[in-house]
Amino acid sequence: MAKSALLKSSIGKKYWMALTGLFLCLFLVGHLAGNLQLLMPNSQLQFNQYALFMTTNPAVKILSYLTYISILFHAVDGILLAIQNKKARPVGYAKSNPSANSSFASRNMAVLGTLVLVFIATHMINFWAKMHFDEKMPLMTQTIEPAPGMKSEYYVGRAVGQYYQVDQVKLPGEKEPEAGLPPKQLEVKNGTDLYNVQANVKVGELYKDLHKITFDFFKDKKYGLYFTLFYVFSMLVLAFHLWHGFQSAFQSLGLNNPKWTPIIKFAGKAFAVIVPILFAIIPLYIHFSK
Amino acid sequence: MSAAKNINITLKIWRQKNAKTKGGIETYKLDNVSTASSFLEMLDQLNEQLVNERKEPVAFDHDCREGICGSCSLYINGRAHGPDTGITTCQLHMRMFNDGDTIFVEPWRSKAFPVIKDLVVDRSAFDRIQQAGGFVSVNTSGRTIDANSIPVPKDDADKAFMAAACIGCGACVATCKNGSAMLFVGAKVSQYALLPQGKVEATERVLNMVRQMDEEGFGNCTNTGACEIECPKGISLENIARMNREYLKASL
Ligand code: HEM
Ligand code: SF4
Ligand code: FES
């Protein structure tokens, strides 16, 4: 009996590249929709609520694990394929003219993909890891002026209308107020939970301020411009990866037909241009905004 | 067409004594090449010159010299089968070149096609892929029924015929940056998969041929599309997609 090898055969590997690649395209759309909220004026609360939803909702959790697995699988499989392909031609040509019959993107998927991987890694360190693991992740505050001239900073509670004056809240690791001053009434525990110190009961929950992290990152006095440029460059790389990748995935899955293929190719190119541009506009807007 | 004239050219040709030795590019000057001659006739002329100089002639593959056997296999000036479309090397003419041109001539480069000598490569990997499933098992004991007695939809027959036009020359492998044989195997799988006679063994065929293709050390297709452009027989990428579908069907 002839055996199929859905994981190991050349064609099997291509199915996985295509499936994970297309899933990652869907992921890009979702991620983009979230990011675009940053362009809205006064998006701080909405964006942080969205960030909270994305890190806690069980359905989103499943999707995000699928995304991690897809990226890993796509990257590992892609690099294995690229190594095999290099080995398939041990001696090269003295003269050859690859650009005459194939596009730049199609010939450089592995390099483009690896650059995208580097970007994903830095991106996760800068935002995802902070959101998930950083104990010192700032909590969302808002300046409120309850009476004229009485401006002060408040932590924003998750329940509507809950605000806690910043100087009454003790952050983890913060020293007790100096002798003579009244002790703080409230204390932050487990990252975002707010406790009454004396009664030791939870009184509310706060938001991690991913919005601030993002704005501070791209507006950083020293490095903000470099971070922005690196982001824009990475989106250019992604655009090339998608320029070839989107339609290629359909061919890998055997979906090639005279009626649909031209439409898929056009849609792929549109996707490859529009999605990275929209992504790149966001850090540019943040960096150059007042 | 303009009248034939004679041109002088410089050739840069890969020379390699045998599979075990290291080869290298050698430069030859060849004068008075008629633009009416074919590329292979030009190489014959060069070999005559080399023999007269008591040098070893250049070994190159050829048989039919009319574009059907698929044995001529030269990578000329950075292009499989040279600077013309829809032709094999034997159909390339010197009118495609100009006086004073330098022309690179190299063998197909693929791990699965090792060089035997000079420009001749061993393409028996393709034979082994064919033997793994590129046929239909028909009892040929004398009571064979005529193939035309089985009705085939015109569209399928045309597509199968177009796939069967593949002559197994290996230009697709040679031109592919990954040294992938998927256009060849796609054509061979398709030519049977489309016909009722081939459907019976379709599952085994695609699994076995793909397995053999992988074992031979060909690379993986990344859909660059270079093969389709350089194929002398215009084999379409649709055949690769069909093979991918057939493989999936056979796997599930
Ligand atoms: C958001 C991120 C990414 C998206 C949306 C994406 C999307 C795609 C798509 C749709 C394909 C076409 C699949 C096919 O030809 O069947 C592809 C191919 C490829 N990707 Fe990615 N990719 C991403 C990240 C990466 C990363 C991180 C790598 C890491 C090395 C990578 C490496 C590759 C390679 C090597 C190929 C070519 C595979 C082949 O044709 O054999 N990609 N990608
Ligand atoms: S598919 Fe085309 S290039 Fe490849 S072996 Fe067949 S005829 Fe030659
Ligand atoms: S010699 Fe037969 S195809 Fe060229």
Image (spheres, rainbow, N blue to C red):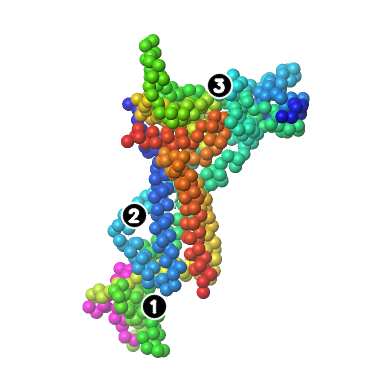
Is A58 left, or right, of B144 in this rendering?
A: left
Is B206 left, or right, of B218 in this rendering?
A: left
Q: Is residue B82 above or below residue B140?
A: below
Residue at 49% over, 29% down: B162
Identify the amino acid type marked 2: Leu
Viewer-nearest residue: A10 or A127: A10
Q: Quadrant of the N terminus of chain A?
A: top left
Q: Nearer the viewer, mark 3 or mark 1?
A: 3
- List the residue tagged with mark 2: A63
- Please give the label number shown on residue B69: 3
In three-dimensional space, the C-alpha distance between marks 3 and 1, rounded to whole angstroms, equals 79 Å
Identify the amino acid type marked 1: Gln
Residue B125: x, y in percent? 49, 25
Is B33 left, or right, of A69 in this rendering?
A: right
Residue at 52% over, 25% down: B167
Residue at 38% over, 19% down: B149
Instruction: Judge whether residue A68 is colored magenta.
Output: no
What crowding class fits label 1: few (fewer than 14 Cα within 10 Å), some (14-19), or many (20 or more)? some
**Chain under label 2?**
A
Viewer-nearest residue: B126 or A141: B126
- List the residue tagged with mark 1: A142
Asked whether mark 3 and ligand 3 are closer than 8 Å, the reply comes as yes
- What's drawn in magenta, residue-wise? A181-199
